[in-house]
Image: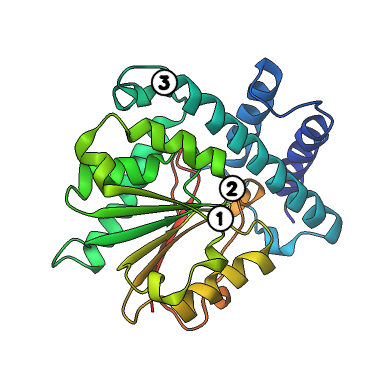
Amino acid sequence: MCCQGLLLVQKISELYHKISTLESLKPSKDVNSLFTQLVLICSPPPSSPSSIDVSTLCSAVQTMRSHLIKLCGEAEALLEHHYSTILASHQNPLDHLSLFPYYSNYLKLTHLEFSILNHHAPHAPPSKVAFVGSGALPFSSIIMALKYLPKTELHNFDIDPSANAKAAMLVAGDAELSKRMVFHTTDIMDVASDELREFEVVFLAALVGMEREEKVKVIEHLRKSMGGGALLMLRSAYGARAFLYPVVEACDLRGFEILTVFHPTDEVINSIVLARL
């Protein structure tokens, strides 16, 4: 590993130790500051020489990375619950989505995903799509519904009933959108093939299956259950961003045809993988 890579891992390790000793990961000045520093370190500019291949790291760093991803996932869920409550306190929550500090990232990421989807399936927009791991702030499905898929039915799957309850409140005041946004409180592994076959596109959130074995099981379940020709869009990570989110490898997508892999070089964190069954 080059000197820049070693320095990067050292900085990430220092932040990991600070984060892992916090009493709570709920939004606060200290929590927000540490995770902001972490995101900035893990998403260096394209010209930076500190790019890193996490697959080459030693076992101790791999263990730290695995724990850090779980901490990031927990903190992200708490942040989303916090802001979902704030948004729901407004008469028209959809008019205040920009209150969320990373909303612009969601706008860019969703635009990228739609552009990629439209490139590979340009003829007609899907009539029904699924978002797996939609969370308390289902920005991806909301933005997709409002800006890119105005007639599509969007089904949001999350295992957390409180997340779904909060998410549903955000769209309840919009008569048109609330008819197209459906929320399912269930583990995606328990969703039968007769239901999953109805979706032309399935979006899999980055933090569904934080351990590789878990994610592979979810992908395999989707492979067995989705309809032939359906598209699976996944969020992955590349380089130092893989300290924030799990990586989806080509070998994890057995039975799927990988259509494209896109790695962002701006403030968007997640890579995008599109595959066809």
Q: Tell me the element at label 2.
A: helix
Q: Name the residue under label 3.
A: 99
Residue type at numbered disc 2: Arg
Q: Is there a contact, CB below 8 Å, between mark 3 and mark 1?
A: no
Q: Tell me the element at label 3.
A: helix
Residue type at numbered disc 3: Leu
Estimate the spatial distance between the alpha carbons at disc 2 and disc 3, rounded to whole Å: 24 Å
Quarter of the figure with the N terminus: bottom right
Of circles 2 and 3, the one toward us is 3
Q: How is the image coloured?
A: rainbow
Q: Tell me the element at label 1.
A: loop
Task: Please name whichever residue, 89 or 245, is drawn nearer the observer in this view of the structure.
Answer: 89
Q: Quadrant of residue 103?
A: top left
Give whichever of discs 2 and 3 has the lower sequence position: 3
Q: Residues within 10 Å of mark 2 (few under 14, many from 20)?
A: many
Give whichever of discs 3 and 1 has the lower sequence position: 3
**Vertical arrangement, residue 126 with respect to residue 115, above or below:** below
Residue located 32% across and 17% down the image: 91
Q: Is there a contact, CB below 8 Å, between mark 1 and mark 2?
A: yes
